[in-house]
Amino acid sequence: MGKKDMAVRLESWMREEGINQTALSKKTGILQSVCHEIMSGGAFPSCGTIQRLAKSTTIDIRFYLLGK
């Protein structure tokens, strides 16, 4: 799985939830600039960031890692 795959998965979830990067940042405590880098496919999130995303959202961590 590449950086773009992660961005597509996260963007799809955000669209379903009706939230933007700013709301995602507030919900997860992840800097908006980091959210932007992930969403643009410019960065792959660290393990800690993936854990924070999974903990702060309704998404199972396997979704981030495997797309399931």
Image (cartoon, rainbow, N blue to C red):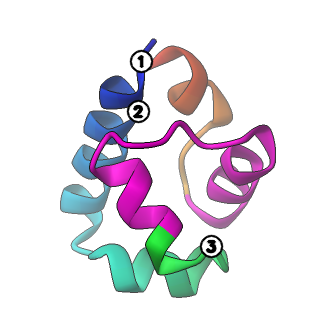
Tag 1's secondary structure? loop
Do the numbered discs 1 and 2 sit on residues whose CB atoms are within 8 Å? Answer: yes
Q: Is residue 55 above or below residue 62?
A: below
Q: Residues within 10 Å of mark 3 (few under 14, many from 20)?
A: some
Circle on res. 2:
1
- Measured in 3D between alpha carbons, the distance from the residue under mark 1 to the one under mark 2, in whole angstroms, is 7 Å
Comes first in the chain, label 1 or label 3? 1
Residue 14 shown left or right of residue 45 in the figure:
left
29 in magenta:
no
Judging by the rendered image, the residue that carries numbered circle 3 is 30
Q: Where is 24 relative to 13, above or below?
A: below
Q: Give the residue type that dot 3 points to.
A: Ile
Residue at (27, 76) in percent of width and height? 20
Task: Inspect the image, locate mark 1, and give the three-letter code of the amino acid beneath it.
Answer: Gly
User: The residue under label 2 is which amino acid type?
Assistant: Met
Which mark is drawn over residue 6? 2
Element marked by disc 2: helix
* Relative height, residue 13 to residue 56 (above, below): above
Specify the segment rendered in magenta. 34-57
**x, y (%) of residue 51?**
76, 48
Seen at 32% across and 40% down, the residue is 41
Q: What is the C-alpha distance between the residues marked 2 and 3?
A: 16 Å
